[in-house]
């Protein structure tokens, strides 16, 4: 890759995006700072005529979702609380930014290696945490503020690393298999059941699409992980199927309350980030805990932003899946196809795990997810353009 061919402003955007990706598993503040740099850097290139902006369809849906979010905040039961959290919609700009600013697969590979380094550092800290060497914690969270956020990031990366292992050869394949393994270990140490289930189904889906006969190896791998897992992880997994488990019961209460809240505020919801306030009025009498959220993407979005916003969000998930499935089916380049495959696995993970956890509300998970579902569309767009130009060139030669 020749950096000399790029001007200063293009290099500024490239390195801003690289550091943005790198810091997602380490520091949300630094990640968002570099995201801001890259946004302004790209807009500068647009104003100078060096770059253009093309809007992908799933960003149109995200924009409509953002409008509902703004309206919900303005008519919230607690406007001050909602407006304070409204800045999160800026993260939606990740989609048009990566769709337009990055169309070279070589750039994406560098970004993914940068992300891998950060994941390895996070994995190392998780091991130290769980061993009690540094910041002794029962549920490892790495550099992130919460173990659930860590589980979401690790689950998404595990799908990405597995797909990269499928697309590479020799030593690079071994490297990605090792990265896949450490991300699964890190995910296990978070003791987060929803992420385990979502990752398992996302990875299984990826393997089925790629080569179903590999399911036996996947099964053996997860059996090995289960056998080697600490006792706390085994107990945590078994508790997911125990109806008497307190956390299971509380999630049922949250879901009941969420449905009641959606029926009470069907159009614009109760307001962004106010479910934790309104929950006290709608929770069943037997519920003990007051909660920060409803542990479900569907219920949280429906209750806080309203049913129309929920429908738009579901359409965003659906079309993101459909568009990446087309890339998987029709791209002729191996790296692009497997990038789309990792995107499909990421969508399966976010949706399934999101039935039991509000993972779309985690900034780090959201940022990594939007990156993963966008860059395959971007590099596929470049492939299509090159193919069209190649055909036109051949026609002129004739």
Image (spheres, grey):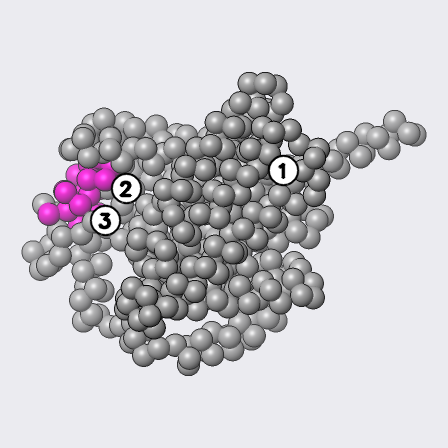
Which residue, as the protein is rendered here, is positioned at the far left? Answer: 285
Residue at (50% x, 33% y) in the render: 38
**Left or right of 217 on screen, residue 315:** left
From the viewer's perspective, is the residue at label 2 or at label 1 nearer?
Answer: 1
Residue at (75% x, 37% y) in the render: 387
Q: Are the residues at dot 3 and dot 2 in contact (C-beta closer than 8 Å)?
A: no
Label 3, label 1: how far apart the Cα atoms are: 37 Å
Indicate whether 330 appears above or below 312.
Answer: below
Where in the figure is residue 346, as x and y percent of width and height? 48, 53
Residue at (39% x, 68% y) in the render: 127
Quarter holding residue 367: top left
- Report which residue position mark 2 lands on: 302
Mark 3 burial class by Cα count in 10 Å: few <14, some 14-19, many 20+: many
Magenta span of residues: 257-280
Where in the figure is residue 171, as x and y percent of width and height? 67, 65
**Left or right of 374 on screen, residue 274:** left
Q: Element under label 3?
A: loop
Mark 2 burial class by Cα count in 10 Å: few <14, some 14-19, many 20+: many
- The answer to which of marks 2 and 1 sits earlier in the sequence is 1
- Report which residue position mark 3 lands on: 293
**Left or right of 290 on screen, residue 302:** right
From the viewer's perspective, is the residue at label 3 or at label 2 nearer?
Answer: 3
Disc sitting over residue 103 in the figure: 1
């Amino acid at each position: 890759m020749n950096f000399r061919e790029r001007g200063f402003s293009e290099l500024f955007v490239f390195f801003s995006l690289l550091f943005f990706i790198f810091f997602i598993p380490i520091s949300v503040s630094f990640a968002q700072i570099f995201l801001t740099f890259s946004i302004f850097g790209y807009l500068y290139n647009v104003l100078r005529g060096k770059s253009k902006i093309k809007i992908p369809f799933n960003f149109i849906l995200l924009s409509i979702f953002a409008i509902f979010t703004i309206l919900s905040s303005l008519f919230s039961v607690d406007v001050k609380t909602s407006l304070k959290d409204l800045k999160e919609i800026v993260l939606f700009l990740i989609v048009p930014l990566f769709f337009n600013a990055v169309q070279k697969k070589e750039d994406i590979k560098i970004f993914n290696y940068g992300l891998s380094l950060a994941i390895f550092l996070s994995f190392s800290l998780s091991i130290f945490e769980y061993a009690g060497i540094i910041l002794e914690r029962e549920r490892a969270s790495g550099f992130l503020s919460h173990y659930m956020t860590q589980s979401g990031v690790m689950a998404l990366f595990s799908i990405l690393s597995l797909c990269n292992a499928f697309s590479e050869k020799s030593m690079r394949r071994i490297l990605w298999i090792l990265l896949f393994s450490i991300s699964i270990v890190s995910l296990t140490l978070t003791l987060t059941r929803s992420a385990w289930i979502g990752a398992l189904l996302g990875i299984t889906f990826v393997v089925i699409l790629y080569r179903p006969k590999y399911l036996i190896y996947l099964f053996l791998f997860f059996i090995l992980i289960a056998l080697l897992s600490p006792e706390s992880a085994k107990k945590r997994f078994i508790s997911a199927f125990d109806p008497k488990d307190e956390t299971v019961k509380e999630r049922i209460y949250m879901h009941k309350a969420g449905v009641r809240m959606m029926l009470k505020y069907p159009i614009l919801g109760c307001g962004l980030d106010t479910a934790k306030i309104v929950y006290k009025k709608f929770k069943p009498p037997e519920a003990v805990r007051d909660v920060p959220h409803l542990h479900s993407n569907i219920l949280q979005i429906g209750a806080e932003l309203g049913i129309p916003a929920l429908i738009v969000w579901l359409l965003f998930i659906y079309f993101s899946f459909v568009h990446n499935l087309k890339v998987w089916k029709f791209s002729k380049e191996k790296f692009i196809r497997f990038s789309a495959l990792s995107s499909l696995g990421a969508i399966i993970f976010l949706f399934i795990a999101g039935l039991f956890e509000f993972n779309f509300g985690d900034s780090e998970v959201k940022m990594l997810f939007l990156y993963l579902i966008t860059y395959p569309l971007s590099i596929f767009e470049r492939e299509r353009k090159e193919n069209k130009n190649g055909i036109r060139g051949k026609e002129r030669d004739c």
